[in-house]
Amino acid sequence: MIGQWLQAFALTVGVESAIAVPLLRAADDRLWRRVALVFFANLASHPAVWFIFPRMGASYAVALLASETWAVAIEAVFYLVTLPAASRARLLGVAMIANGASWGVGEVLHATTGW
């Protein structure tokens, strides 16, 4: 179970980094810091998405909606706290786009490989 989570976490961080790191450049021009921010934002959100929401006893659709809302909200708040001078709308948009992309990649992988 932990091994599967680590794989999913690495995939999520990879996909979201490819999107969020460039989009956060206007908020901080230090590449290393943007990479770290995306990593830690995902570390704050992903364990609950993987371990808690699927076990809530809700339908798949409800658990998915709750977990993705959680991920976007936690990551947006994380970016707001760590990048206070940045536009709130931009940071929320980054979290939404990055999470949508990682969810989409996961769905494609699941549909094509069963993973």
Image (cartoon, rainbow, N blue to C red):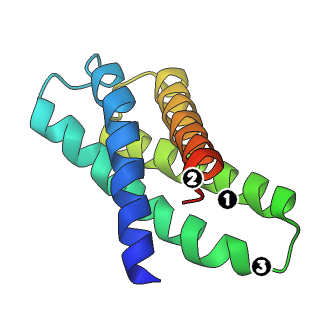
User: Which sits in the foreground, 101 or 110?
Assistant: 110
Quarter of the image for residue 66 reads: bottom right
Q: Determine the CA span between mark 2 and mark 1.
A: 6 Å
Question: At which x and y percent is residue 9?
Answer: 39, 60
Say which residue label 2 marks: 71
Asked whether, in this view, residue 89 is left or right of residue 80, the answer is right
Relative to 84, say whether 22 is above or below.
above
Relative to 106, say whether 53 is above or below.
below
| Mark earlier in primary sequence (3, 2) | 3
Question: At which x and y percent is residue 29?
Answer: 15, 22
Question: At which x and y percent is residue 1?
Answer: 47, 83
SS category of the residue bearing label 2 = helix
Say which residue label 1 marks: 67
Amino acid type at image mark 2: Ala
Write the residue at 53% across / 34% down.
Answer: 101
Say which residue label 3 marks: 56
Amino acid type at image mark 1: Ser
Quarter of the image for residue 64 reads: bottom right
SS category of the residue bearing label 1 = helix
Which residue is farthest front? Answer: 113
User: Which sits in the foreground, 4 or 48?
Assistant: 4
SS category of the residue bearing label 3 = loop
How many neighbours does mark 1 have within 10 angstroms: few (below 14), some (14-19), or many (20 or more)?
many
Asked whether, in this view, residue 75 is left or right of residue 54, the answer is left
Relative to 32, say whether 69 is above or below.
below
| Mark earlier in primary sequence (3, 1) | 3
Q: Determine the CA span between mark 3 and mark 2.
A: 16 Å
Q: Determine the CA span between mark 3 and mark 1.
A: 10 Å
Amino acid type at image mark 3: Met
